[in-house]
Amino acid sequence: MIPRSDEIGVMQRFTRYTFALTLVLLGGGMACGPLAGVALAQTTVTTGLTADPTLPIEVEADQLSVDQATGVAVFSGNVRVIQGELRVTAPKATLNYNEDRTEIQTVHLEGGVILTNGVEVVQGQDAVYTVPDGVVVLTGDVVVTQGPSTIAGPRLTYNLQAGSGVMDGGRVQSVFVPGSGTGSEPKE
């Protein structure tokens, strides 16, 4: 059963999974590879993940609607999630629950997603986190920025369990600044 919109449980579940999405993409930076500055068709992106799940979580949106029959909760209008240094903004976030309405299956952020921790910024048009698989897919002009270094491409797929991801779906562009401690490893 999905909690009523006035219950904090929906927001806590939403922010926990959105927080995990943010950590995946922003956690510990990108590891620099030997071909820094080369544009590649596919780039492996790795991050080191650290998080304190005990920090308070704040979710704000202009509206929250819940449909218990379909197992869908939708946050809409200036959606903002804050936990510690992490910030996630998007116009809309849709949570899809499993059949018995006890676990979130997917979190879909759409309409222009910005994830930041004050050091790194990830931007794209849409992000989908498939909770049981631990996979996050960010699409639509994806740009990962850490300091002066950037990786840009059509799609970033990141596996929480494996701790690595792939930027692909077309031409991938990378700019790595030597000595900045940022980058990615090219995948052959």
Image (cartoon, grey):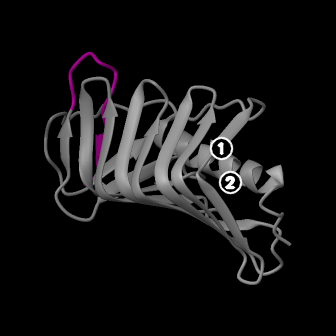
At x 33%, y 27%, the residue is 182
Where is residue 10 shown, x and y percent of the image? 76, 57
Mark 2 residue crowding within 10 angstroms, few (<14) / some (14–19) / many (20+): many
Q: Nearer the viewer, residue 9 or 135?
A: 9
Q: Nearer the viewer, residue 150 or 125?
A: 125
**Magenta residues, start to end:** 176-188
Residue under pointer 1: 59
Q: Nearer the viewer, residue 126 or 7?
A: 7
For label 2, the SS is: helix
| Amino acid type, callout 2 | Phe
* Residue 47 vertical position relative to residue 127 in the rendered view, above or below: above
At x 51%, y 59%, the residue is 92
Any mark on residue 14, and which?
A: 2
Quarter of the image where the N terminus is located? bottom right
Where is residue 4 shown, x and y percent of the image? 82, 64
Mark 2 → mark 1, Cα distance in angstroms: 8 Å
